[in-house]
Image (tube, coloured by chain):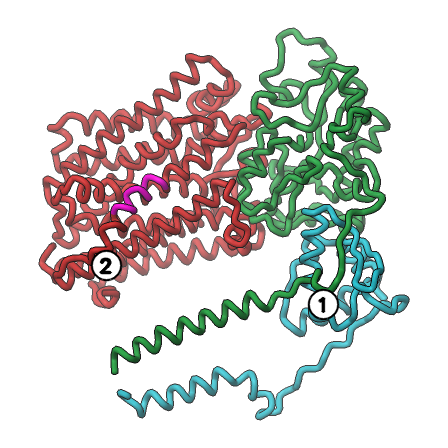
Amino acid sequence: MKRSRRQFLKVASLSVLGLSTHLATGGIVNAAEQGAQYLPNENGLKAGRWAMVIDTRAFETPEDFDVCVKACHKAHNVPNIPNNQNIKWLWTDTYEHVFPEQGNNHMSESLENRDFFVLCNHCENPPCVRVCPTKATYKKPDGIVAMDYHRCIGCRFCMAGCPYGARSFNFSDPRKHLDMGEVNPEFPTRMLGVVEKCNFCVERLAQGLMPACVEAAEGKIVFGDLNDPESEVRKVLAENFTIRRKPNVGTQPGVYYII
Amino acid sequence: MIEKVLKGSPKFYVWLAFLGSLIGLGAFTYLFQMKYGLSITGMSRDVSWGFYIAQFTYLVGVAASAVMLVLPAYFHHYKKFKKMIIFGEFMAIGAVLMCMLFIVADMGQPQRMLNVILHPTPNSVMFYDMMVLMGYLVLNAVIGWVTLECERHQVEPPKWIKPMIYLSIFWAFSIHTVTAFLYAGLPGRHYFLTAIMAARFLSSAFCAGPAILLLLLFVVRKMTNFNPGKEAVQTLTKIITYAMTINVFFFLLEVFTAFYSGMPGHAHPITYLFAGHGGHVDWITGFMWVGAILALLSLALLIPPSLRDNEKLLPWSLGILVTATWIDKGLGLIIGGFTPNPFEKYTVYTPTVPELLISLGIFATGLFVVSILWKIALDVKKEAGTF
Amino acid sequence: MYNTKYVLPGLLIFLALFTSPFWAGKVFGTASYERPKLALPADQKECIEPVEYMRAEHMQILDTWRDQALREGKRTYVASNGKVWNVSLQNTCMKCHTNKAEFCDKCHTSNSVTPYCWDCHVEPKGNQ
């Protein structure tokens, strides 16, 4: 009696488990099964490897930077948080901080005093993608390092992994620091507890538009396909001396600086 | 065996109630973190990991240290440790649980934590860390429970438990190695980016973990007359001493590489930790010096056999050792890794009161679990006459 | 069976409680479920897919939309009837369904689901 009851319970519980897993997995229907199709946008801009070249000589006054930063932060609803738990997509810093270990003694006055843009480098070999435990950060075939905020668990491994300090974490609800009447209604905000960063305006490229900062810079920032020898970025790179941040970490940034 | 928990002295229940109140306090504070996010912690954009992750790292070491009993007992048939093994294994269970809780406490979106399993990412060390921690928890729970049950019924443990024990030995090394890989593979963090990280982790784990175990067993000896055995204690203390010597040696290797090479990136975090920055020292500097002095003091008290075998002095020596290793790994490691930041800028990190309360709650949870498991083990041993 | 006189009534009570959601309403005559009345777009006749399908599967569609747009870079949706749509919750769905409170929330509230879409996605300002 005792033995058979035990066996019955074993068989019964296993069958319930099997049945419920079958129901759980079988219940999900894919929308694509309905004969719908997904295509890339017809007028979207395409590239083998998106890259950016910033002509740092052309950015002189704080206003030069400001229009670009404003355009970026406005387009992406980036909040302005007045403490060290802040969010940064596109910002500026001095030469010694942007290019540590690449500085010289007695640099030219202009280099010493000038500011430089900082943003996500969209690396060829991104450590943030390597360390992300959920594929919330991933590299697209066109070289853009993108994020899926729906999937981010907020472990901040990517922030530890990024050698460029390009990532920000939403320590608090970003909407507390945004005027919700003024946000760009075409782009989402982020939520509490996820990491975010510059997305190379992937949503604008899909609509056939250049990134917001490039548009606002009026030629001082060049954006294009690094794999296309005829592209403007390649032309600018061929004609000017450029550097990238922290070449020794082997990430192959997609952002170049004309010095 | 679980019924042993129901029959205990009033003292035991007062102790559990005390821990329960701390757990409640931590849980209550955690509600605020759920609502206001990690903004209630001292972490920032620059120092994006803090006290939670540091405690997680330290406790993985404590969990792994059970192997310092299992390995001599099963590889070298050192029978004297057999009496203590169950306590090491049960302590490991508590430690792994605390590790998991600290990781959850550190997450921005804890309700999505299953994403790690739903979207498995083999290129992320975090994925392996989750697997090895889960595996180690199961291994220790199964091995501990089965061997204790056999001890109770006074029969030989089943044959299949042997391979599991051998597996747990390798597993213990793997959990702390993988935890070190979380740090040692990050290209932009000079203090972390060192091939010796896993070796440092293991050496500090194998002195601190057994030291904590011995300290707890001394408390138990006072309360219940359970005696782990004089020779066993002395052998384990020798293991602790060797591990601590290696631990200090490894740290000095780091100091040599950083300062003899003169590479700024490697030197800056250590300089910051021990001397501050720009003529300004932060709270961590005091801790680091105390840690360094205590580390050397613990060696001075443990290396000479006459001092090491002095039972009156030993708890103090071990306490000093635990404090020193905790400052190195539970505070300095994370702060040094994030200061200076990738812009060579210095942001001070100080844990906040809510952060510490939540941590206290997690520590209390671990102690609660260990208390219950040890109570079961002690009662079973009393019954079986293997006290 | 041992202790039949305790076990059987116990089982019966458990079964009664466990199935109560299915019969309690009918027996005690508490309010029955009414399908919430949703505010539909005035100027549009059809959604991207048939209504029944949308009602049952909109969450799966949104899930697929998110992955297709973000990961595959495919932001054009060719519906099963051949019509073309921009893959975007904010810029396609919510352009027609401008009244979140009377459309999304109503159903979600009566079914006790709290999706976190609008923690990030900006809800339209206009109400119909």
**Marks 2 and 1 belong to one chain:** no
Determine which of the numbered discs, if any, sits on residue B146 in the image: 2
Residue span colored magenta: B166-174
Which residue reaches farthest top?
A106
Label 2 neighbourhood size at 10 Å, few (<14), some (14-19), many (20+)? some
| Helix, strand or loop for the magenta stretch, by majority | helix
Q: Is residue B307 left or right of residue A54?
A: left
The N terminus of chain A appears in which quarter of the rendering? Answer: bottom left
Task: Tell me the subunit letter for badge 2.
Answer: B
Chain shown in green: A
Residue B32 seen in the figure: no
Colour assignment, chain C: cyan
Q: Position of residue A78 (x, y in %)?
A: 72, 42
SS of the residue under disc 2: helix
Q: Position of residue A117 (x, y in %)?
A: 72, 26
Q: Is residue B23 above or below residue B259?
A: below
Q: Is residue B270 left or right of residue B245?
A: right
- Residue at 57% x, 34% y is A127
- Residue at 24% x, 44% y is B213
Residues marked 2 and 1 touching at CB (< 8 Å): no
Q: Is residue A171 left or right of residue C86?
A: left
Residue B169 lies in magenta, yes or no? yes
Colour assignment, chain B: red
The C terminus of chain A appears in which quarter of the rendering? Answer: top right
Identify which residue, B20 or C124, lies in the foreground: C124
Q: Position of residue B54 (x, y in %)?
A: 43, 39
Identify which residue, B340 or B146, lies in the foreground: B146
Per the image, the residue denoted by label 1 is: C105
